[in-house]
Amino acid sequence: MTSPTDLQDPYERIYQVCEQVPAGQVATYGDIATIVGGACDARTVGHAMAALGSRAATVPWQRIINRTGGISTSGYRQRELLEAEGVAFDDKGHARMDQHHWKGPSEAWARAHGFQVLPPRDAPAPAPEAQLKLF
DNA sequence: GTGATGACGATAT
DNA sequence: TATATCGCCATCA
């Protein structure tokens, strides 16, 4: 297992997880780092996003935001792209994490690719009316 | 090899 | 809730 050929580039794994984020949902850098596991940190994910390069066309980098739900980028129209996907923002420029927070990939997919799943979370605040409004 | 920087997170106030 | 401080890791000069 010490062979680098067995493990893909650390960034490649991050991109792969980012591709699992469906449209209309957002994930935090910490979530991606938790799913990738290993020496992957929230900051490492941020560096990976900055090193996207040509992969920016296939990786939904715009769905990756910081833990506060704010957009750290400036000039990339990240918020505009998210709004186009149906992600709601408040007047403070923070995404509605309670509505669009990605719950993580399927356990089967994560296990099949050697990834991890996000820790279980208690129901934050179910809004029946809000769900009905979606789509 | 060392120091500085960064698309961050968590905790404390 | 917002701000301030510290910590962790990878990349670049």
Image (cartoon, coloured by chain):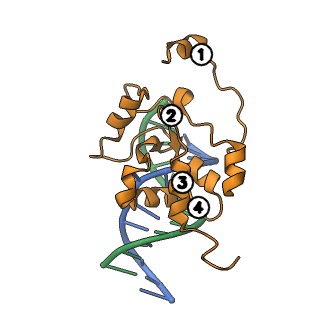
Chain colours: A orange, B blue, C green
> Circle 2 sits on which residue?
A25
Q: What is the crowding at mark 4: few (fewer than 14 residues within 10 Å), some, or many (at least 20)?
A: some
Residue under label 3 = A16
The residue at which mark 4 appears reads as A40
Mark sitting earlier along the chain (2/3) = 3
Q: Do the CB atoms of the residues marked 3 and 4 lie less than 8 Å apart? A: no
Q: Amino acid at mark 3?
A: Gln
The local crowd at label 1, few if under 14, some if 14 to 19, many if 20 or more residues have their Cα within 10 Å, is few
| Residue at screen point 63% across, 21% down | A125
Q: Secondary structure at mark 4?
A: loop
> Which one is earlier in the sequence, the residue at label 3 or at label 1?
3
In the image, what residue type sits under mark 4? Cys
Quadrant for residue C9, please give it: bottom right
Under circle 2, the secondary element is: loop
Q: In the picture provided, is B11 more to the left or to the right than A9?
A: right
The chain holding disc 2 is A
Give the alpha-carbon distance from disc 3 to disc 1, as whole Å: 31 Å
Q: Nearer the viewer, mark 2 or mark 3?
A: 3
Cα distance, mark 2 to mark 3? Answer: 16 Å
Residue under circle 1?
A: A127
Disc nearer the start of the sequence (1/4): 4
Task: First in sequence, mark 2 or 1: give its number.
Answer: 2
